[in-house]
Amino acid sequence: MIFRKKLRIFSTILSLILILLNSQAEITAFSAENPTDLFVLGGREFLPNSEVMSGGVYVYEVNEGILVYSKNPDKRMLPASTTKIMTALLTLETVDNLDNLVEVPFYISEEFWSGDRNTEDPSLAGIVNGQTNLTYRDVLYAMMVSSGCEAANILAYNLGAGEPSERIPDFAAKMTAKAKEIGCKDTNFSNAHGLYSPNNYSTAYDIFLITMYAYEKHERIFSDIVSTVEYSMPPNSLNPTGYSKMNSNQLLIKRSDHNMNPYYYEYAKGIKTGGFNEYYTKNSEGGWDTHTGVANLVSIATKKEFTYIIVTLGAPWYHKDLREPGEQGLHHAYKDHKNLYEWAFSTFEKKRVMEKNEPIKSVKILDGVKDEIPLYPLMTEDFFALLPKDIDLKSAIEKKPNLNENEVSAPIEQGEVLGVIEIKLANQVLGEWQLISNESVAKSQSSKFRDKLSAVFGNKFFAPVLIIIGALTIVMIILNYINKHRRLQRERFGRVNRTGGGRAKSRSKKPPNKRIRR
């Protein structure tokens, strides 16, 4: 009976454990389908209204220098032709004169006929092997405007080191090294064009870092290249009179009678498309396994006072028979960018967060003519931050002052730094400033007197002098005692002499002779 009772208790406990494990499994599955690595400036209540199809996303406002949205920003993904942003950056960092001519050997296109299914159908810019009239500038435009893979190889070949077969791999290694120098932690480049390779990977955040670096360090030429809608290429044997290449980024292509482009976005100024409908890996039987490709896009757009850079990686790329009417390969990437721009431009605005003359916190003053004074942020103008229009500043913004000390001793100089203040929004630091005193505080008279005494007592000669004075005082006391003692003896001796010399002297005198009368 007791055994059965214990068995029932054990079964109940086991059932509860299984229920908890099953619930945890359901939570884990839900988390896998709904990524937790998601950030929205102001909180998730300000999420975009439209679904973001891309797997990795990074949305950054350039002028304010702040992230407004990210989704799996550190997840390694296939960068495809967004790789060419690094190829362009390294070219701009290496070449002194973009109008110098380049060499175009047969080797630069050999891989496109090598039998590798991943390189057999690349996007090309119409450059002919052996062409002698191409400059670095021409090749840069051919690569970034029309996404020419042979153009990427030409740059890598001309700027790489070693034997002809070593130059492109050497340049790819330099691309990886430059990425690490910029701060990329999850990026490796094995080629210059971005065609599929298992060793060619990056993240939305790393691609953003590369793009932002190129934008800041080479803004004029980089912006000119990536925003060009159409570029005229020099003539070659296939095009004796020259030819033009259109930008592969449909955000830049205006609608016209013969081009009903649904992806045009009037505020966009570049930057680079990237993707492939399929990629292939070798299987154990020597054949090829087919994988669904990716649609990537890096763009920049300016409207009024705001400029956003958006990086999206891993949007789905459907096959032709699965497309919507009029849909192109980068359909979901373009939709993501247009939706994110419309959301960002309509959701965020600059709000005053802190005034330059706003007292932040008081600090106690020791030994001063005042007991405490207010501290102010060291700034020349009021601080505005990019925030959601509907956000409640009082509840959302945290002003966190950190004082050097809770109590400071007078005197205090005007402008003296006594701490710092951080402005935070959901643990994201929006700004940091030093806290200063706007007035001077003198020492009190009592503290000045005490300081003088302390100065005297603290003097290094004070102790020896005190010892000497003490020793002299003791000597004086001893001498005074000796002198006093001697004086008393002399006085005593004088009194004896005045009384006749004492009894002894009177006994020594002979009595006077007297005659006896008989």
Image (cartoon, rainbow, N blue to C red):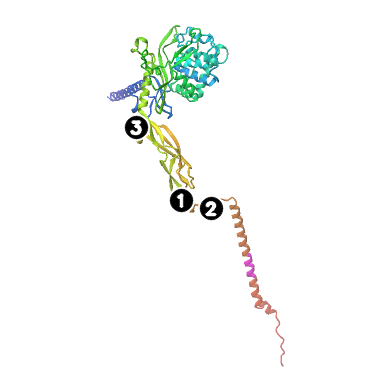
Residue beneath disc 2: 452
The C terminus: image quadrant: bottom right
**Label 2: which secondary element:** helix
C-alpha separation, residue under disc 1 versus residue under disc 3? 43 Å
Residue 61 percent coordinates (x, y) = 41, 27
Q: Quadrant of the N terminus?
A: top left
Please name the amino acid that badge 1 sits on.
Val
Q: Residue at x 62, y 59 (%)?
A: 472
Residue 256 is at least partly visible in this image: yes
Front label number (2 vs 3): 3
In depth, the one of 65 and 292 nearer the eye is: 65
Residue 186 in sight in this render: no
Q: Which residues are magenta?
A: 482-489
Residue appearing at x 71%, y 88% in the figure: 514
Using the image, tell me which numbered label, if any, was put on residue 391. 3
Residue neighbourhood size for the residue with mark 2, other residues' Cα within 10 Å, grouped as few (<14), some (14–19), many (≥20): few
Q: Quadrant of residue 39?
A: top left
Q: Residue furthest bottom?
A: 518
Disc 1, SS: loop
Number of numbered discs overlaid on the protein picture? 3
Query: Which mark is in front, 2 or 1?
Result: 1
Give me the residue at 33% from left, 28% from top: 45
Q: Which residue is mark 1?
A: 369
- Which comes sooner in the sequence, label 2 or label 3? 3
Q: In terms of image quadrants, where is residue 427?
A: top left
